[in-house]
Image (cartoon, rainbow, N blue to C red):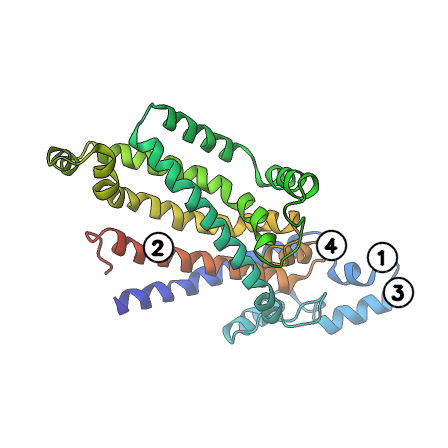
Amino acid sequence: MINYVIRRLLALVPVALGVATLTFAIIHLVPGDPVVAMLGETAAPADIVGMRHQLGLDRPLLEQYAAYLGGLAVGDMGESISYRKPVSRLIAERFPATIELAAAGMLVAVLLAFPLGIIAGSNPGGAGDLGAMGFAVVGISIPHIYLGPLLMILFSLDLRWLPLTGRGGLEHLVLPAVTLGAALAAILARMLRQSLIRVRESDYMRTALSKGLSARAALIRHGLKNALTSVVTIIGLQMGGLLSGTLITEIIFSWPGIGRLLIGAIGARDYPVVEGCVLTFAITYVLVNMATDFVYAVVDPRVRIS
């Protein structure tokens, strides 16, 4: 087990190197000058040259790349051009808000998906199945960028039940979490339905029924746990997608997370912040996938981590 964890953690090194290199190359190929974006179009040429020298942007690209990797090797992501603060501090300040939003979105997705998937999978073709899968189709069909404003208009502007934007108490989290988790809930519900339909035909299910259990009791007591393996896979894979989905959701609801920081940094050509945010997303994605492998072993004892 320890060797497995060490191998997976060592695998982070090439992933981080690849993401850092790709992000560095792409952000430096994007048209625009961070110094001009910061000082304005009317800034004096001497000021622009002086600021470029101060930030080290007048050095050859390879030299900047080597300095960037050297900083990463000792845990230094550089200093933000716009905020004039260490990038690691900016990310540390914003990352908890993003994790909070992603976790709430996942919670909403699971709370919606499990009842819908069980209802649909326990009676395929019935009224409950059609209703649950109808909801799933609606959930998948509406993108975040439309669902978020619709919820804001209904629950914030018309009914005035929930705050419109910002981060605060639980009431601030409801609309962003529903916006983020709705599509994933639909995917998980459909996956759970298919898994339950498959396990209904298993020998152990027929044995459970022959012992006198009702179809629903046998499905929940014996079938649900075996159906969860594929659902856990989707949850693990979609957690990365959920993190990337926070970019749009944070912009819509003015949520002070790392996604909003990244979008602002791209507009300002703040190279160190963009590189730091993308690298953080990538490493988090890999760690979530690694955690998913451990959950396999808990859900399905036949799976062994080695």
Q: Residue at x 54, y 69 (%)?
A: 69
Residue positioned most to the bottom: 74
Q: Residues within 10 Å of mark 4 (few under 14, many from 20)?
A: few
* Local SS, label 3: loop
- Residue 82's disc number: none
| Front: mark 3 or 2 | 2
Which of the labelled discs sits on residue 32, or is there none?
A: 4
**Distance Cα–Cα, label 1 vs label 3:** 9 Å
Mark 4 / mark 1, whichever is N-terminal: 4
Could you say which is closer to the camera, residue 138 or residue 111?
111
Q: Please, what secondary structure does the residue beneath circle 4 have? A: loop
Q: Is residue 193 left or right of residue 201?
A: right
Q: Residue 76: percent from the left, percent from the top?
A: 56, 73
Badge 3 is on which residue? 44
- Residue denoted by label 2: 292
Q: Amino acid at mark 2?
A: Thr
The percent position of residue 80, horizontal first and vertical second, equals 67, 68
Q: Is residue 1 above or below residue 204?
A: below
Give the labeled residue for mark 1: 41
